[in-house]
Amino acid sequence: MTKEKIKQAALELFSKHGYSGTTLAQIAEQVGIKTPSLFSHFKGKEELFVTIFHEVNWQIVEHVKRLAAERRGTSVKETLHKIFLRSCQFYLENEARTLFLKQTLILPPPFLQESIMDGFFHSEDALSAVLTEVLEQGIEEGVVCKRPVEQLIAAYYCMMDGILMQIHVYEPKQMEARITSIWEHFWRGLQAERCEGI
């Protein structure tokens, strides 16, 4: 229980103040323990930071995996739409996690960059495997544009990156309208009937 409280407190502080602006003393104070007690759970701030990053980073992947596994009897469009909406919902409903993820990927602590990027690419590979399965099904069924799946996935990631950046700029209602519009344009571009001759 204490370990989870430490991670939650650290997540909130890291998301507000970054790695360098957060001290173990601040984390301990927020949890209500003495600073030395932190070392019963983590070797130090570096391990705590990286642990939180990997957990947050994989949460969205596991979420998408569950959605894809439940798609039996669901069209490719519905599956992709659900994955897209739930991913956006995750970002919107988990402000601290979203801020932390954004900051860490854009400006990782230099001495942790290799570990962070290795973890990110590993999780991206897992997410890409799920998206590949869904998109290949769409291509086989003739509903998704017959293009290299890697290109389609790259377009999806660019779309999600844009949403991730805008979430803390616009009000929730504005963002919801944008998300609806973005999906409509993305799906229109994916449709097989619209890419003939491209």
Image (cartoon, rainbow, N blue to C red):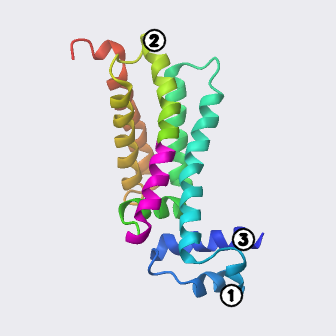
Q: According to the image, label 3 marks what residue?
A: 3
Q: Nearer the viewer, residue 169 or 61?
A: 61
For mark 1, give the secondary structure: helix
In the picture as drawn, the residue positioned furthest to the left comes out as 197
Pick whichever of labels 2 and 1 is earlier in the sequence. Answer: 1
Q: Amino acid at mark 3?
A: Lys
Which residue position holds label 2? 140
Q: Residue at x 28, y 17 (%)?
A: 195
| CA gap, disc 2 and disc 1 | 58 Å
Q: Is residue 31 part of the magenta span, yes or no?
A: no
**Number of the front mark, 3 or 1:** 1
Q: What is the x, y in percent for residue 176? A: 45, 45
Task: Look at the image and tell me in which quarter the C terminus lies.
Answer: top left
The residues bearing labels 3 and 2 have C-alpha atoms spaced at a distance of 47 Å
Tell me if residue 54 comes above or below residue 135 in the rendering.
below
Q: Residue tagged by mark 1? A: 36
Q: Position of residue 197 (x, y in %)?
A: 21, 12
Q: 10 Å neighbourhood of mark 1: few (<14), some, or many (≥20)?
A: few
Residue type for callout 2: Glu
Specify the amino acid type for callout 1. Pro
